[in-house]
Amino acid sequence: MLKINLSLLTLLFAAFLFSSCQKAENVKPEQAYLDDAKKLYDEKKFDESIATYRELIKNYPASEKNAIFAYNQIAGIYFDGLKDYQKTVDTYRELAEKYPNSKEAKQSLFMVAFTYDEYMKDKDKAKDAYKKFLEKFPNDTDPNDKMSESARTMLQVLESGKTIEDMIKENSGNTDKTPKTTTIDTTKSKK
């Protein structure tokens, strides 16, 4: 009986090794996925390009740089190529959830709000998304990065119900912040 169990265990172990080796043979190098996905995109095979980027993410989960790049490419394909703005939003959210401490997470969450606002014309979802963005990123730490400032401005515009152009016109008349004073002419004498 022990001999049969040992033989069975050996057979199972060999099958496991064989299947592991076979799976590794099907996985391409990271750069091959990137090259293939770009070629498919250039050929306007958008769905196939997205699938290839997703394979890269699945097969190389520890490769943060390439995974983030792949997520951004997928979002870009949904946005520009397929005009599927909901999937654009979903992809940006997925990136931000998987890599919350990356600078790309900040950009992704901003793009969620911006896409709702400018392309999907869903002002309520845009407001919510800008608020969530500002909860997570209340300030810009990089002087070249003005996303928090922009999000705050966009949220003010949405909450005011005015267009950005109307707000600019209103504020352009208030460029002089010094209070107006009235001068009294004391040189005239009373008769």
Image: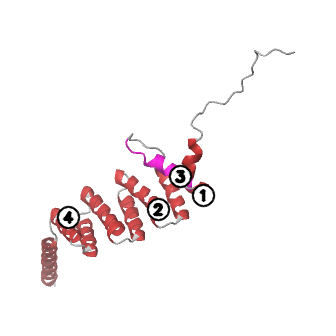
Sequence-first tag of 2 and 1: 2
Name the residue: 16% across, 79% down.
12
Q: Which amino acid, by three-letter code, is at mark 3?
A: Glu
Residues drawn in magenta: 144-157
Sequence-first tag of 4 and 3: 4
Q: Which amino acid, by three-letter code, is at mark 2?
A: Glu
Name the residue: 31% across, 61% down.
72
Labels 3 and 1 touching (C-beta < 8 A): no
**Quadrant housing residue 68:** bottom left
Circle 1 residue: 161
Labels 3 and 2 touching (C-beta < 8 A): no
Name the front one of labels 3 and 2.
3
Between the residue at mark 3 and the residue at mark 1, the CA separation in whole angstroms equals 12 Å
Name the residue: 59% across, 46% down.
170
**Residue 102 visible in the shown view:** no
Place of residue 60 in the rendered image (x, y in percent of width and height, measured from the top left):
23, 63
Above or below: residue 124 compared with residue 164: below
Circle 2 residue: 118
What kind of element bears circle 2?
Answer: helix
Circle 4 residue: 34
Circle 3 residue: 165
Labels 1 and 4 touching (C-beta < 8 A): no
* Quadrant in which the N terminus appears: bottom left
